[in-house]
Amino acid sequence: MPLMRSWVESANTPTTDFPLNNLPCGVFSRDGDDPRCGVAIGDMILDVAAMEESGLLRLADEPVLDVPFWNEVMELGPQAWARMRILLLGFLTEGSEVKSQVEPFLVPQHGSKMHMPFLVSEYTDFYAGRHHAFNVGSMFRDPDNALPPNWLHIPIGYNGRASSVVVSGTHVRRPLGQLKPPGSDAPVFGASQRFDFELEMGAVVGTASDGMISVAQADDMIFGYVILNDWSARDIQAWEYVPLGPFQAKATATTISPWIVMRAALDPFRTTTPEREVPLLPYLREPGPLLYDIALEVALAPEGKTETVIARTSYAEMYYSAPQQLAHHASSGCPMNVGDLLGSGTISGPSKDSRGSLLELSWGGKEPVSIAGEDTRSFIADGDTIIMRGHCQGDGYRVGFGECRGKVIAAQAVPDWAR
Amino acid sequence: MPLMRSWVESANTPTTDFPLNNLPCGVFSRDGDDPRCGVAIGDMILDVAAMEESGLLRLADEPVLDVPFWNEVMELGPQAWARMRILLLGFLTEGSEVKSQVEPFLVPQHGSKMHMPFLVSEYTDFYAGRHHAFNVGSMFRDPDNALPPNWLHIPIGYNGRASSVVVSGTHVRRPLGQLKPPGSDAPVFGASQRFDFELEMGAVVGTASDGMISVAQADDMIFGYVILNDWSARDIQAWEYVPLGPFQAKATATTISPWIVMRAALDPFRTTTPEREVPLLPYLREPGPLLYDIALEVALAPEGKTETVIARTSYAEMYYSAPQQLAHHASSGCPMNVGDLLGSGTISGPSKDSRGSLLELSWGGKEPVSIAGEDTRSFIADGDTIIMRGHCQGDGYRVGFGECRGKVIAAQAVPDWAR
């Protein structure tokens, strides 16, 4: 598919994340006004909330954009999502007859503040990257048996904490927690010394279910995707996670990019999961290519310094797709809801510089990563900003996600009563 | 504290769960009408939603009982909860001057349908019963090292699935899932053969937090308690839970009793957690007794047959209290919200007939439990109803929770595409 040209000139450049082909959904505010729904186009935002208010955009009998989140649009279902896309394409396409009516609803991205684009109902994180699972298993268990026995059969997941999901740009406070220093008999309570990021994609569930769903149905239920950073305190995790899994190690924050890129925009970039090493059970078999070829990168910028890209990989490295994860999630009869967020699991590639966490990049701290010549990092230092970016590369254009950015600030002082 | 007498005569009997001392919060409907907030008194329900509508009960400047859940009352905070209790006591106490005005707002519990009493924001389940952890560790790991090394230091928890929480009386469909039959190399997909209950108490968080909280603050944040059955598919769990914990094994349903018993009603029955085997870190130390002496029982009724009580225990068996769990939950900076539900973990006592799950009662299926003379059970059979009850015993009265009941119905047939 070629670039679809828009009368918004900045949308026609090969490096913008937001050509007409994209049209992702976000929530923004300006000058301290109330947050409202908007759609990115080039370096502008189309104020679709104001368009609905004016009567120019009508998605349903009742207003659905009069709230600062996209959940009500999701509730309308896939046909309405497709219809919305057609309307937006008509408004913004080069030569549109309604340009003069639409133009007043454009505001610059510059100077706009982005907010959470949707209300997160529940958040589930998976462990579905083959290279990541192998790396972690090699470090903590045994390189000869790095993958748990269930890994090639189940898209392993665990429930996370929806209340901790924040939008790009939100500072992340280094967590406190129980840590067991090497050689010590007992744990201490203090700031995590091994605070890490995890590069993931997040799938936003846009349709509810109750009972089993096929992988194809699961794909239809997904409204769109975001980049996701599942911040992880490795030392808290190491001490707490046996036998019931990660808990406080993952509860501080999960950052998402501010624009939900809808499935239709990603469709031209579909690709297949890798060949199965063992056959999957039928309920997990894919009807077609359900991954996307999304080029991803992670950069680290120490306080006041320029950033260094420390990893480059692709979403195509996943062993399980989001629809497979969603089908598995629903298989027990677990009710899935509009606004559920599914983290893909850390996305690492096969090479050393394609690993999606510092744990892997520094191999548990043994091989610190070089940052802009002088510094090194085994884990995140206070003041560091982690920036994740991703895009699908088209012919002369890209469909991008915007940044997923978070600065780590110092831990809360341990209160006197906790000393 | 003695029985507080009410002009509602049925509230003065020694066996009612709902004397004036209790006044628990529920949501009910009659004859297909919309669900509404009510307070149990004897065998009646006080229609507090209608009382607010009429102007007789006023809890805040704006209505808070005009919705079919108690979250808005919780949002008002602990002082408002105390004030509400004083108002209700005044309405219902023997000799009340407003009896004639209040009486029209009483409806019988008989013929009323109970609904979820609150919107569950997020659901967390803990593993904080010493005997349960020891039993499970003995069965699956090693009796000499039954407790994981972190168990005496951390109230171990994991995030559950809020969407699966249902009110007492809701049928529970046996889950499908991946199972690995003994001796088999590969998993199969089918109905759980080892479906179980877990007897727990649930703490309802009524105040939000963001950052560390002390155990005393955590206690103040709890609105009340319910009985909770954390249905568990042991065979799905055994195959899926390494390394990231239970997921689909616990996602089918969690049943709660319909009445939230407020902390003030439980106050006379406070008791201490057992002596610590190793000292806790300061952030987990309790300022006073934070458990409650709640007598609990579990009964099983096969389809069309009478029930057999198969376990009796007490909430006082917990090693960690709900305020300790909540303080730990918030320790990483995890934002806690109004409507969060914390499951205590399975409550087992030291004796064989005080175990809070069939897994323990039947010792992994090796010692089936006798049911009403003829049947036995290692795990739950289709058609079985599990009934949990609990109360605090006062001098001539009890403060009870009502039933936490659920009937297990046959699994969904595996669809053709999943065979």
Image (cartoon, coloured by chain):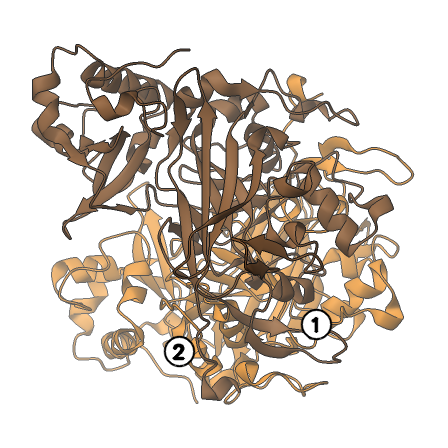
Chain colours: A brown, B orange
Label at residue B151: 1
Number of other residues with Cα within 10 Å of mark 1, as a class: few under 14, some 14 to 19, many 20 or more: some
**B107 sits left or right of A414 in the view:** left
Place of residue A8 in the rendered image (x, y in percent of width and height, measured from the top left): 20, 22
Q: Is residue B115 visible?
A: no
Residue B73, position as x, y percentages in the image = 28, 64
Disc 2: which residue: B220
Residue in the picture at 48% in, 61% down:
A252
Please name whichever residue, B183 or A255, is drawn nearer the observer in this view of the structure. A255
Can you say whether B186 is above or below A132 in the image?
A: above
Q: Amino acid at mark 1?
A: Trp
Using the image as rendered, state which of residue B147 and residue A240 is in the foreground: A240
Report whether A98 appears left or right of A221.
Answer: left
User: Which residue corresponds to the image point at 85% horizontal and 61% vertical from the top-left?
Assistant: B141
Disc on res. A233: none
Looking at the image, the residue that sits furthest to the right is B183
- SS label for mark 2: helix
Going from N to C along the chain, the mark reached first, 1 or 2, is 1
Are the residues tagged 1 and 2 within 8 Å (C-beta)? Answer: no
Instruction: Read off the chain for label 1.
Output: B
Question: What amino acid is found at the position of numbered circle 2 in the picture?
Answer: Asp
